[in-house]
Amino acid sequence: EERRKKKGRTVFDFERWQKHRSSARYLRHMAGMFSSSVIQGLAVPLAYVVTVSVGVATYYTAAAKGMVPLFPALKVLASAPFSLTSFALSLLLVFRTNSSYGRWDEARKMWGQVVNRSRDIARQALAYIPAAQVHLQDVICRWTIAYTRALMCHLRQGEDLGSELAGILSPSELAALLAAKHRPNFCTQVLSAAVRDAQLPGTGPTSREPTAAVPAGAAYRMDENITVFVEVSGGCERILRTPIPLGYTRHTSRFLMLWLTLLPFSLWESCGLAMIPVAALVAFLLLGVEEIGVQIEEPFSILPLEVISSTIEGNIRELQATHGAAAAVPSPI
Amino acid sequence: EERRKKKGRTVFDFERWQKHRSSARYLRHMAGMFSSSVIQGLAVPLAYVVTVSVGVATYYTAAAKGMVPLFPALKVLASAPFSLTSFALSLLLVFRTNSSYGRWDEARKMWGQVVNRSRDIARQALAYIPAAQVHLQDVICRWTIAYTRALMCHLRQGEDLGSELAGILSPSELAALLAAKHRPNFCTQVLSAAVRDAQLPGTGPTSREPTAAVPAGAAYRMDENITVFVEVSGGCERILRTPIPLGYTRHTSRFLMLWLTLLPFSLWESCGLAMIPVAALVAFLLLGVEEIGVQIEEPFSILPLEVISSTIEGNIRELQATHGAAAAVPSPI
Amino acid sequence: EERRKKKGRTVFDFERWQKHRSSARYLRHMAGMFSSSVIQGLAVPLAYVVTVSVGVATYYTAAAKGMVPLFPALKVLASAPFSLTSFALSLLLVFRTNSSYGRWDEARKMWGQVVNRSRDIARQALAYIPAAQVHLQDVICRWTIAYTRALMCHLRQGEDLGSELAGILSPSELAALLAAKHRPNFCTQVLSAAVRDAQLPGTGPTSREPTAAVPAGAAYRMDENITVFVEVSGGCERILRTPIPLGYTRHTSRFLMLWLTLLPFSLWESCGLAMIPVAALVAFLLLGVEEIGVQIEEPFSILPLEVISSTIEGNIRELQATHGAAAAVPSPI
Amino acid sequence: EERRKKKGRTVFDFERWQKHRSSARYLRHMAGMFSSSVIQGLAVPLAYVVTVSVGVATYYTAAAKGMVPLFPALKVLASAPFSLTSFALSLLLVFRTNSSYGRWDEARKMWGQVVNRSRDIARQALAYIPAAQVHLQDVICRWTIAYTRALMCHLRQGEDLGSELAGILSPSELAALLAAKHRPNFCTQVLSAAVRDAQLPGTGPTSREPTAAVPAGAAYRMDENITVFVEVSGGCERILRTPIPLGYTRHTSRFLMLWLTLLPFSLWESCGLAMIPVAALVAFLLLGVEEIGVQIEEPFSILPLEVISSTIEGNIRELQATHGAAAAVPSPI
Amino acid sequence: EERRKKKGRTVFDFERWQKHRSSARYLRHMAGMFSSSVIQGLAVPLAYVVTVSVGVATYYTAAAKGMVPLFPALKVLASAPFSLTSFALSLLLVFRTNSSYGRWDEARKMWGQVVNRSRDIARQALAYIPAAQVHLQDVICRWTIAYTRALMCHLRQGEDLGSELAGILSPSELAALLAAKHRPNFCTQVLSAAVRDAQLPGTGPTSREPTAAVPAGAAYRMDENITVFVEVSGGCERILRTPIPLGYTRHTSRFLMLWLTLLPFSLWESCGLAMIPVAALVAFLLLGVEEIGVQIEEPFSILPLEVISSTIEGNIRELQATHGAAAAVPSPI
């Protein structure tokens, strides 16, 4: 199952979009139906529906041959609720779809914030911390990268933060980070210390040291970006710790399973044996909607966080590399 | 009832998510149906629907035997409104579901803000208040913890703030807090006083005392976090004091009960005695949707606020513990 | 009608929530159906529907007895549009419900902002304005209370601002306020003047007077809260001046009334005289949804603004009372 | 058509709300049906539907008399798609309604921002710019009014900015404004210059001129309000330049027209000649929903911008008039 | 296909809106149906549906003549799922429509932010950077234009940034920009350097150079606008790299194609040969909704970014041109 999840961590480029939009997509999606991860995840409930259908067919066939008594109430009992409840089933599936997608979208946007604010704090550190404190620029750039990796490992099971950061932090820095329990918080602490050192308050308003020359506004615009990191850590933890109210999830499962259990009884009269594939098809279509919603409810194992983290590292490295060229542009000739 | 609520205060971890996503969930949810809290909460209206159904069945059976006169208008009267009004019933259930979930989600996000901003103000206090004022760092950390507990007790009945804060505030501090009527507000007042002392304005712009060395920007970024606490207190109170407009809640109840009262009349002809379980099943499926919505409309007795508060305490304690290590990182070697 | 509105200005507490959640609610709501304000507001259109139904029944009965000619087209004309248009009627009722609730919710949240920011500006004034300017603290606290009352009277007809503020402003202050046309704006002007006096700019950067000792950041964090008051005033006026586009309101009324006018024709064949109560019931269920939406479209006569204002006054008075105790907490022992 | 639009620019007061809420509204709306602007805007498509209906009726009548051959496939062809596609038509009408209302609501809220921030910048200018620079207070007040008129004329065809501002700007100021191509931008430039002059930076940090006495925080809180003006200008232009994706608008029109073209074929059998008014009625109900959505898609010709602008002018004039009284309140007696 | 996309990059003016609103639109849209881009994009699936329909018609005709055996189960198998699943198909199309439109709308609003903040940073640079540093004003204006072009080329395939910026940057500036991999980031670096030079921090708080006279607040309000640029770059990349969860897209395609494949079987009995055009029509109406949603899912090839970029360039050029006139307005006469 977890392998399937990794396959789904897609990042699109221009070519993928052209393929995605092309009208050949309909046939391609049809062709890949039976190898899709949705149908694999539905093996258990589909098997259940088919078993019920076969049982119902056997019973009615036997009853038709007089081998067992026929209870007409059974059919009636099964068919009446369909028209009366399908709107409520629809309601629950819409709710499941919208709230799961809302969670997935919020998680994706929070990681988009990590991308944006990583670039932003690196840009500010390079522009506003003077050359005399170049080691602080470097600390901010490297620990911003460390923050993104630490957050990824915080949100997923089985990631190894040590190997992720081997080339980024020094061994002693890495040891300090790994000694902390809440590692994303530790990274924000280091970033705060670097901002404070860049604007060392000294012991009085006139005693600022010559090397600590970041203007107050710049220092606290950097602090705003650290606050965004703190917000994203907490926001992701919130999604990870809190599912959609379980009452809805359970009621939807029960509703769907009751509905699909009664379906073969209701279809027998009009469909006969054809009822078995029909019930399986209807079950696939309806359960598929619910299954996708459940899969994306916890978005961090689906989102390509490792690609996003690498992008951030690349961006920050490039900002450091091009800083000299960019800073030279505004100088009067 | 209140015991059931406590059981529902779930916090997920990686294992729970795997179980939640596994395709065995359908069968597990079916198996737990009759012990679910939803069905227990529906005892009264389900009993009502079954009673009506049995009454209707008795009447029609007696009428069929000529013991009582048969009013055909009764059946007609009962069945006509179904197709004409089910879209409006659907509308009301969608509205109930979305607005209750919206309230639950807003409450959860506000408590997420408490997590985020607690960490943030502790991070800022540790980074920007100089070592000479370490007691102010400590006041901010402890009273931030006190704020989260005070808010929890403010939003729930029967919590005991005194015992919650026994190890966190000193006896005299606790006495001062308990003497206040609006305790979350008192905590924000203490936090404001600590921020002011960290940037003591003195009596003129050049007379700042040497120990009060927090730069203005840092002081007022902390004040922004206090404003967030004030906003969260007020936002939670708003949810607690203001239900969804009662007109909708009442109209939905009435609509559902009228609909379910007429259901047995309408089902008799096609279902006979099987109408009794069918009516109960339909009632369970529809009332279940409304019941979950009503249960989460007031979210503070459902959300695991005590777990969130403990998490915040742990986070702040760890930020204090790792502060030295983090602050040492940016120093040039 | 206006008396009914006042009854609906509900503020919930823990007991109300328990009652609200209890499963006895279904029977309680059924019992109170005929005394509900919704049904009273629907007297006119329900009378119309019953009149049409009786007329139709009379006509068909007379026609059946050969007293008047029977136009079969009439029945056909009436029944055909039902299945073809009910989805559009559903759409209009959903739109009405969502947009009215959106307005109500926005208004409630804006008044929540008034609560939050009143507490916040009082907290800041008490913490950051030095004791030498205690009269400015008092001006800010009292005029914040005045702002909330002035806004309430601005948004409702027939309130008397003078008596509301008798104990809060001095007679000369009250006279100045009542002389202004836009009184909420006048309150924000007074608050701005108090903030300016707390940070008197003097005539040069080094000439700040010793009594005007609020740091710039604190002064302008207070100004941010005044901006929120200005935003809330304007936001409430926007809701008061601008209804949902009238085209939708009118089209929904017309759609519903046409639909309900044709209903008796369509029900006659299947229901006979039972059509009269059926039509009335369907009309009650559908019109009820629209009626609640129209009632909450203008939310200020429904929301308990007087309770919210009193809460604010109580909060600010308590902040003033507990200020000394809170300010003493951070002092080192 | 444009005259009808002007009629619709409604501003509500307490009396209008009472009328709006009263249960007489149903009969009033019915009575005004044929004079409504919606029905007038639908003249063309309603005429089309009636023409098709009459043609279909003529053909079937002739065919029944054997005058023309009867193609039974025609009826079949027409009726089958109804049940299969009405959910998709419903979807498109919901989408049209929600996205048009979203645009209208966003535009209304942006103009609400203009109201709020106009008052706010005037409040700040009066409170924080010292009396020695009273001409800068006046420039800010007058050019804020000019901004709102310039934006209105920017968003509508055929308005005359010169006459709107005759009494507000001096002839030379007006000439400078009219010489600019993007006039709302020019107004924000003038406001920025006034803020800069109020806090003239001089040539070094200690050389601030005595008359330029606005503290930095106040100056840049005013600049934030100018940024809001820039945002609103751009946001309104975005709505004006970018319709809802035309694919949806066209697909909805085509869907509706195909659906209504086939309707008479499908209704003939059950309704006979009554089909003509039925088809017209269904067309009115469905097209009405789409028509209102299209009319409010471009909201600036519907919203009462001229009333909002006048309100702003009145508010700012009153703020100037009451400034002295308000500023005197906080003075200690 | 890509040519079709360019045609759709529409910018509306007053005339287009009048045409868009006129009631002649219904007939115009009908007339243009077969040349519409939607129908062209649907060639493949429509051909598929027609092929299936013809095959089914041939089979049933042959079976009716006894040439092939008739399997009645086939018809049953095909018709049963329709009523049972259409609500779920509706749900998926609503979800597709809303989430695609949400992405399109977010992209459009982010480019609206580029417009707003470009004007705002130019306005601030001209107002607050003193004449002695006019070259910095020019750098900010020109590199803001460069940013918008760089972002457009970053989000589209096949654009040539070099020729776009030929007249805006100097050859050496352009070379520096083209040498960077992430060019929008490089532009924000240059803008940051210009802001820093405008408020050169020097080596101590009293050593600010006389030419670097921008007040801190102004400098960091410009930095806020640069942060918005960084946010927009990242936000657009997020939309470009992350499609709607592919599970939904694939399940919708499969659902639609299965539904349309079974449609001819289900229609044969009632429609006969007329089933072929009916199936094609239903397919066009349903597939059209999904197709438009897929086309706008990646919005950057649809939105008129080149027009928006040119508008920004024109706005900034005009701000530079009118700066002198605007700055002269507030001077006292």
Image (cartoon, coloured by chain):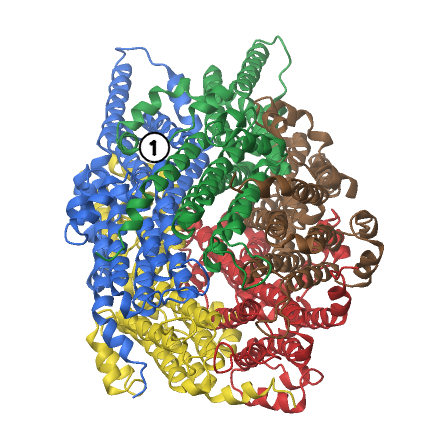
Chain colours: A blue, B green, C brown, D red, E yellow
Q: Is residue D22 left or right of residue E203?
A: right
Q: Residue at x 41, y 76 (%)?
A: E208
In the depicted structure, whether residue C19 falls above or below residue A182: above
Query: How far across and down, in percent of the image, does residue C247 sit?
Result: 62, 59
Hey, what amino acid is under mark 1? Phe
Taking E303 as reference, is A143 above or below it?
above
Residue linked to disc 1 = B12
Residue A73, image x, y percentages: 41, 17
Badge 1: residue crowd in 10 Å (few <14, some 14–19, many ≥20):
some
Give C301 or B127, whichever is nearer the viewer: B127
Q: Is residue C156 left or right of residue D268?
A: right
Which residue is nearer to you in this view: B98 or C48? B98
Foreground of the two, C155 or A331: A331
Determine the residue positioned at 31% across, 66% down: A123
Quick check: can you spot residue A266? yes
The residue at the point 76 percent across, 68 percent down is D322
Can residue A187 be seen here? The reply is no
| Quadrant hosting residue E161 | bottom left
- Residue B12 image position (x, y, % from top left): 34, 32
Where residue A97 appears, x then y in whole percent?
A: 37, 43
- In this image, D208 relative to A214: left or right? right
Instruction: State the residue in front, E151 or D17.
Output: E151
- Please report the residue visible at 62 percent of the width from the left and 55 percent of the height from the top: C129
